[in-house]
Amino acid sequence: MITQNAESQNLMEPVYHSGKSLGLNKALISRHAMTVLKGLRQKGYDSYLVGGCVRDMLLGLEPKDFDVATNASPEQVRQTFRNGRIIGRRFKIVHVRFGREVIEVTTYRGAPAEWHHDERIHRVGEEGRLLADNVYGTLDEDAMRRDLSVNALYYDPTTDEVLDYHDGLRDIKDGLLRVIGKPAERYREDPVRMLRVVRFASKLGFEIEPSASTAIDQHAELLTNVPAARLFDEVLKLFHSGSAIVTFEKLRQHGLFEFLFPATENILRSEEEGYPRTFLPLALKNTDKRIRQGKPVIPAFLYAVLLWEPMRKYKEAAMKQGLNEYDSIQQGADQAIVEELSTVAIPRRFTAQMREIWVMQYFFDQRKSRQVFRLLENRKFRAGYDFMLLRASVAQASSEVADWWTRIQDVDENERRKMLNSLSGHSKKRRRRKKKTNS
Ligand code: ATP
Ligand code: MG
């Protein structure tokens, strides 16, 4: 078996370093991660921090979450922590929960294994995708199953020892993403690794090692083998990482974006009245800015942004067929969403919100008095309004309308009525009269 050969060739002894000599700042480790590491050690098991947290700490960044690797079986881990819960069926991992923080504890992996613990990904795969059951292994086997050299560093804070199996430290120093093993093989085993490489390249500003980079160009279409539910999570990680715009550009350069958002990619390739389409890049830059400012970002807004162009295209087509604008938006939304669901499974609660954001755009443009008050009270008003501002900044909405909506939020009820009354136009006159008789 090819994988077995690759494995026996690659098994390595680790190189040991002290965290101190590498400038690793232990203070970045969460209290709860320490509790888990120590709890396992007290019971006589191995325990190491591994993956992104070690990588990030070596880069002086604050880790997003903490992953622990151990030789204890999932059952043994669970018995060690009252707050531990076994997740996944084929490959069990343990989530040890402390309030909002979850420490993910993984038993060393041996034979080829899928990385996602969610059962949904275990559907029968295409040729080359891993179908074997997970088997627990040793630490060196575990290191080899990881995706990138920089993600295969282990750290034991009790001894301050960093274990480096695949020259990850050198690659961190050089800012290089190197796939462990043969890139094409590793992408075939799990195509999501291509997305991870792009995500880390964007987030960390690292180069992708040339063979790992060309293998993405050649195998991007493997993404079609990934279950749509898993891609939903991955897309959020890609675009809510704080470097959405760079990620977007890289995904397109490597031909990956078209396998995530085929309809959007198609439209992006065409110009709009002689101009390149600027809405999406602008919206992604805005997402990055919000994350930098610590403002919240929501999945529905992101997906509304990513599928806006297809929705508009279908809406235009519906209008040409004689449907009114409102119904055309509904139909356009249906088409854009249904089409995307076969690639990326957006949960229903989010598609409902996307639709709401899109429909709000229609009411923003209309400014009919009854709708104005309704809109201002809508729970998703802020999202709809932010979306409209983006449209205005690429001339898809008038800046006069955008300013009007900015102003009306800040004024009192009286002033709001004045603003409505001062809107010109036939339909508004009628309403103005109505309002007067009411008051
Ligand atoms: P971050 O948490 O900052 O997004 P990470 O590298 O920690 O990045 P996780 O998804 O938390 O990513 O995974 C933890 C570790 O598990 C990774 O560093 C890597 O060693 C391993 N891993 C995760 N997904 C895969 C995969 N698809 N293939 C191989 N190894 C993986
Ligand atoms: Mg992590």
Image: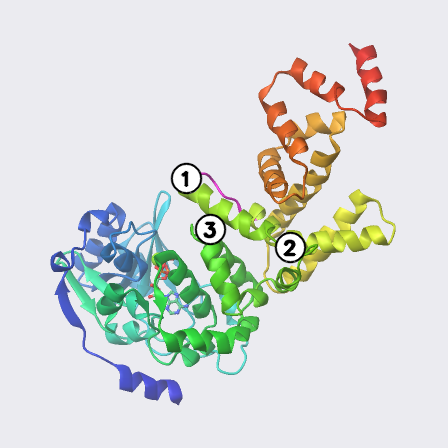
The numbered dot on residue 275 is 2
Residue closer to the observer: 341 or 316: 316
Nearest to the eye among marks 2 and 3: give it.
2
> Which quadrant does the C terminus fall into?
top right
Residue 404, located in which quarter of the rendered image?
A: top right
If you read the primary sequence from the N terminus, does the residue marked by circle 3 or circle 1 appear first?
3
C-alpha gap between disc 3 and disc 1 = 12 Å
> Which quarter of the rendered image does ligand 2 occupy?
bottom left
Is residue 87 something that shows in the picture? no
Vertical order, 216 against 27 (above or below): below
If you read the primary sequence from the N terminus, does the residue marked by circle 2 or circle 1 appear first?
2
Is residue 288 something that shows in the picture? yes
> Which quadrant does the N terminus fall into?
bottom left
Name the element at disc 2.
loop
Name the element at disc 3.
loop
Instruction: Give, as a single range, the part of the protein colored magenta.
Output: 293-299
Residue indicated by mark 1: 294
Inspect the image, locate mark 2, and give the three-letter code of the amino acid beneath it. Tyr
Residue that extends furthest to the right in the rendered view of this protein: 322
List x then y, in percent, for residue 231: 53, 62
If you read the primary sequence from the N terminus, does the residue marked by circle 2 or circle 3 appear first?
3
Residue 40 shown in magenta:
no
Give the left or right position of residue 172, taking residue 343 as reference: left
Vertical order, 349 against 104 (above or below): above
Label 3 crowd bin: few (<14), some (14–19), many (20+), radius 10 Å = some
Residue indicated by mark 3: 240
Vertical order, 31 against 404 (above or below): below
Q: Residue at x 48, y 54 (%)?
A: 245
